Amino acid sequence: MHWKFQASAFRGFLNNALRCAPLLLCALASAQDAGLAGKWVLALDTGSVTDYGILEIAETEGEWRVFIDGGSVNLLSLDENRIVFDFDWTDGFDLLHVTELSGELPGDRMSGSMSEGGEETGTWTAEPWSGHPDTGADPAPIDIYGVWSSVSRGTHKDAFDLTPTGAAINETYDSTLDDPHLRCVSGGVIRMEDAPLDNEIIDRGDHILVHYSYFNEFRRIWMDGREFPEGIEEAWLPMGYSIGHWEGSTLVIETRGMKPTVWDAAGMPVSAAAVLTERKYLDEAGRLHTAYELNDPAHFERPVYRHAYREPGADTGFDGYVCDPHAFYRGLELEGRLEEYWQSRTRF
C-alpha cells in the first residue's frame, strides 16, 4: 500500500519502496550511524518473479525496530557491514513460511541472499524510498483499461502489530467458521484485489468499473469529484465506497465504508472505520502496479502496506465463477458443528 512504479519514475519508485521495507537494522545504534533509519524499497527476487515491499527501520524510546510492510520482523544480527533478519509470509495456499534475509550494508543500498530451511531461495535488495513522484501533480490520465493477470501479490507478510481490540478479534477468529469465502461471500476489496485471478478495468466516464473474476465481484470507483457520503463509516458496504482522481499518470483511489471483514483466510481484521488508499500506475514494461496502504488504527498499530503488479491478460471474457455454499453448511452438519456456527459470535 505504499509503492510507486511509474514508467517515467520507475527508478524513483524502487528507491522509495526499498526505503519503506522494515529491516532489522534498526536494532542497534550503529544503524543510525550508518543512516539506515527510515523507509526502503525492498525487492525480493526468487528467480521467477520479483516481489516488492516496504522496509522500515525506526527507533522508539531507544529501541530499534524493523518492519516489513508495516509488520514487525525479527532482527537476528547486525554489525557495521552486515544485517540478518527473517520475516513471516504466506504463499498462495495460505501456508506459513519464514525466510531469512542476510546482506551487506554498503553505502545507500543493501543487498544479499534469502534462505528457507538453510537452502537459498533468492536474492534481495533495498534502496532508499523518497516518496511518490506524482504526488500533487496535474492530472495526466493514462490507459489502464482492459484485463489484467496477476504476476506478483507482494511480500505477503503474515503477522502485523495489532491493537488490543484487533488482537482480541484475531485470537477468536476461527478459519473453519469465520472465513466468508467458505460460504461464498466475497471478503471485500482487499481480498478481491489480492486474488490471483484476472481483473478487468472498464472506463465508464464518471466512474471506473472493476470486474473481479474471483466471486464475479464488481467495484465502482467514482471519478466525478464527489465527496464521501455522510456517515460512510456506518455503510458496511461489501466492496466499500471508492473515490478516485489522477495525480499525474497515477490513479489514486481512497476507499471507505467497508464492512468489517478479514483480509485473508487466516484472519487479520479490518474495521468499518478503515481507510484503504491505492496508487495504480504503469511501469516501463507496461505492467500495472498497485501500492496499497491500509490505515485502521482501531485494529493496527501502524499502517499496513502491500505492493502488487499485473500484466495485460487475454481479453477472452471471464468464465463464470462457481461457488456453492452447500458444502460449507453440510460439512458443519456432518461434523456436528452447525449449531455452534449459528450460536457463535457475529460472522464477518
Image: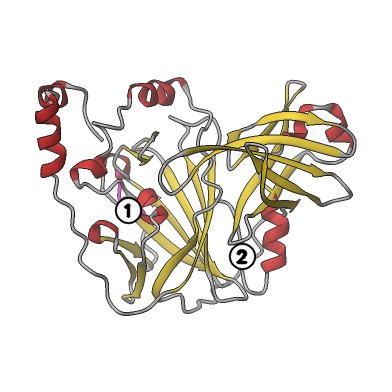
The vertical placement of 115 against 161, above or below, is: below
The vertical placement of 31 against 11, above or below, is: above
Which one is nearer the viewer's eye here, 187 or 16? 187
Q: Residue 90's x, y, as percent? A: 48, 42
Circle nearer the viewer, 1 or 2: 2
Our reading of the magenta stretch's main secondary structure is loop
Q: Is residue 230 magenta?
A: yes
Can residue 235 be spotted in the picture? no
Q: Is residue 56 magenta?
A: no
What segment carries the magenta color? 227-231
Which one is nearer the viewer's eye here, 61 or 344? 344
Mark 1: which amino acid? Tyr
- In which quadrant of the rendered view does residue 232 lie? top left
Q: What residue is pinned by disc 2?
A: 5
| Label whose residue precedes the other's in the sequence (1 or 2) | 2
Q: What residue is pinned by disc 1?
A: 241
| Circle 1 SS class | strand
- Using a 10 Å C-alpha cutoff, classify the residue at mark 1 as few (fewer than 14 neighbours), some (14 to 19) or many (20 or more): many
Q: Residue 337's x, y, as percent? A: 14, 24
- Tell me whether the residue at label 1 lies in contact with that at label 2, contact meaning CB atoms closer than 8 angstroms: no
Colouring rule applied to residues: secondary structure
Residue 342 left/right relative to 77: left
- In which quadrant of the rendered view does residue 330 lie? top left
